[in-house]
Amino acid sequence: MLRNLIHLDLFLGRTVLALNGLLFTFWFAFFLWMGGADVSVGAYIVLTSVMVVFLPVSVIIREGKFNAAALTCSLPVTRREIVRARYGLAIGLGSCLMVVAIAVGLLCPWSHLAAPKLVAPRALLLALTMIVLEVALLLPFLLRFGWIGIVALLIALQVLGIVALTLSRLLGHSTPFGLGIKALANTLRWLYAKLGDPIFVAVWAAVLLLVTVASCALSTWLYERRSM
Amino acid sequence: MTDYALEVTGLRKSYKGFALRDVSFQLPRGYIMGLIGPNGAGKTTVIKLIMNLVRRQAGEVRVFGLDNRAAESEVRSRIGFVYDFPCFHQDATLDDHKRVIAPFYPRWSEETFARLVREFELPPAKKFKALSHGMQTKFALVLALSHDADLLVLDEPTSGLDPVFRRELLQRLSALLQDEGKSVLFSTHITTDLERVADFITFIRNGEIVFSLPKDQLLETWGIVRGDERAVAALDGGTRKGVRRGPYGVEVLTSDVDEARRRCGPGVVVDRPSLEDIMVLMTGEESRAA
Amino acid sequence: MDSILEVRGLEKSYEGFTLRGVSFSLPRGYIMGLIGPNGAGKTTTIRLILGLARPDRGEIRALGLDASTGGAAIRSRIGFVHEAPSFYLHLTVAGLASIVARFYPRWDAGLFRRLAWEFQLPPGKRVYALSRGMRTKLALALALSHDAELLVLDEPTSGLDPVFRRELLERLSAYIQDGNRSVLFSTQITSDLERVADYITFIQDGQLVFSATRDEVKDRWGLVKGGLELLDERHRRFFRGIETSAFSFTAVTDDVEAARRRFSGRDVVIEQASLEDVMFYLSKARAGTGPTAEEGGSSPLGTGRDS
């Protein structure tokens, strides 16, 4: 059933998939070109891994646009299975696009990224972390509120960003926003460093698994109560 | 021990401004039940609750003896559905939909699908949004009829279809019942279609079941008395189901023709009601639940 | 005879579809129902009458005006109801009325308010908040508020419950009471027609099958049922449509009297055909088991006006 569900989303969304996949690929290349030597492996990994999740999101929201969620929910599957399939799709598809991003980073003639660093386990694990966390955050919204939820979330984040930027402009650099960004960057750097340690990796993998399972459980609970 | 295709008991669901209360009825295996009621009465809600598209607040729904929530997957693998709201991917074709839906049904038949597409004259490679309303309805019907479903749950499956196709569809449904023991729950506004094929009629109004009776019993023991206010007074009581006053006199709906004749005297004119008459007379002033 | 609408020899071709030889007339003070299978040409005919498309050939006179020259004038005197409004959804009932009012010189705001009240349409309610049946009633109220002499409705009852449908039909009956106004409406729900229509026009595959009074249809069309052995070539050509099963046949004829004579003494059942029966068995003709509307079969009803 899970395979059938994933096939359903992928097949019906194949045009969107192909189009967006291509668009993202170009964007990766463009970003590398614009950034030139200023782009570090870490920054590239973080940025692209955040972006790749939007490919499966774009596929999943099609259902909401057409009210076709009622179709999926009328098939002989449980809502739990539908949610699980979506998580599988999101993480799987996001990872596939991540591979493409890395390939672009390696193959683009104007890429200044150091190849060994780019394909190092640390980098891959960092990417996986970002993907998993993003999926865990977005999917409950997406499944509960549909595409409107995602749009609302993105708009909220934009607004937050604008407010923070304005504040930082008014109050100078050592503002909550500036501090927040610094803190975030430091956390990521710390993580990146720690991912070199195999024991940490094992623990971290377990944490990621737990986060995914918890998010999936929440999404299931929300989706089961959603009226079609 | 009767074998039931569908048993609905004490179903409850409330939304803002609307509530479904204590809905109960049963459909024995191998029969067709028509579900009628004014717009907004709750027919679509009942169907959504049977399909578990919407979570019930109380009550039970059993399909072939299985709870439709505990055995959700298995129950729905045996149900062919048609909704009165669009639920398909607008940019996808019939073939696209078939490719993704077929794997979910263990008894999917490619042969049946192909035959129905031919007989219904559907273009399999045309996008859903490019189809006319009638074609879209046929689209849904083909998918519902191609996996040997034991129970068909159809919400306005004839909307936008001409009488010719409707009659052929009804013939097809009747054949399914007779030859293969399938069961059908069929909600529609075109009551003449139900008069043609339904075995049972369930009337829902304002979120409540008004009656659920065998069609023959309904059309034979219920009647319309045409007269004046005296008739209304004479028939006062439990069997008077509705009254309608018009420019040409009064119509009174009774659920017991014999009793009506006794009360009103031998000269009274009692007509056989159509389902439409029953609906109209029971959706107005002074109508009481059976 | 004062006809409010006269259609003669109407012809119109689109890619893949042709309307041909359609003629009928509707006198003042009557209701005409237009029936036919999906894609038969009902909507095309209505569009031609309203002057929304020009016929390739033929003549349309409505309200005494020629549709090819006086289209705008005709449209200002016709009330048109076409499904439930799905436009201007964010407007209120009153707001939509004020927009529509601008198109009609004889708009009667007081009448609209009264109708809105009668139809239970709150003036401040937004169109999107109205149910489908209510929207149809709104469309009807709008169509009735500019002193239209002819009401044209295209499938107004599709998707409406019997209660709404009956109310709508009763209003149409009331509308023609003054003997001066008429109604033309197309529908798939033949029982509605049997309830209120005085005239029935049946179009199939772009051609007129008949246009006659309801009584004429009732008297002249019938179903003949009998054993297959009775069905030879002569009889096949006589019927307008035939369905056969293993041992018997059911056929529709437009001349019940002739059928009675033809089969007198034989073991057949001849009964009245409902409009739905007529439509159903005529569709069988297309499958080649009987004559089409063009050839064969006596056609006393052809394209006639009422006699």
Image (cartoon, coloured by chain):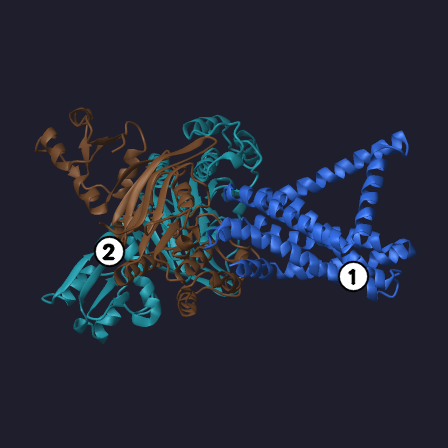
Chain colours: A blue, B brown, C cyan
Q: Secondary structure at mark 2?
A: loop
Residue C51 visible in the snapshot? no
Residue located at (83% from left, 33% from top): A176
Looking at the rendered image, the disc whose residue lies closer to the viewer, 2 or 1, is 1
Q: Seen in the image, is A168 located left or right of residue C112?
A: right
Do residues under tags 2 and 1 come within 8 Å of each other at their CB atoms? no
Residue A102 disc label: 1
Which percent across, then down, holds residue C154? 44, 47
Q: Which residue is mark 2?
A: C273
Mark 1: few/some/many CA within 10 Å (<14, 14-19, 20+): many
Residue C220 visible in the snapshot? yes
Which percent across, then down, holds residue B206? 37, 33
Residue B51 drawn above or below residue A178: below
Along the line of sight, the residue nearer the viewer: A22 or C18: A22
Along the line of sight, the residue nearer the viewer: B121 or B26: B26
Which percent across, then down, holds residue C151? 43, 41
The chain ID associated with circle 2 is C
Along the line of sight, the residue nearer the viewer: B98 or C230: B98
Which percent across, then down, holds residue C141? 45, 34
Residue located at (28% from left, 30% from top): B287
Residue A142 drawn above or below residue C226: above
Which amino acid, mark 1? Answer: Ile
Which amino acid, mark 2? Answer: Ala
Residue located at (68% from left, 55% from top): A55
Q: Residue C301: which quarter of the image?
A: bottom left
Q: Residue C228: which quarter of the image?
A: bottom left
Along the line of sight, the residue nearer the viewer: A68 or A81: A81
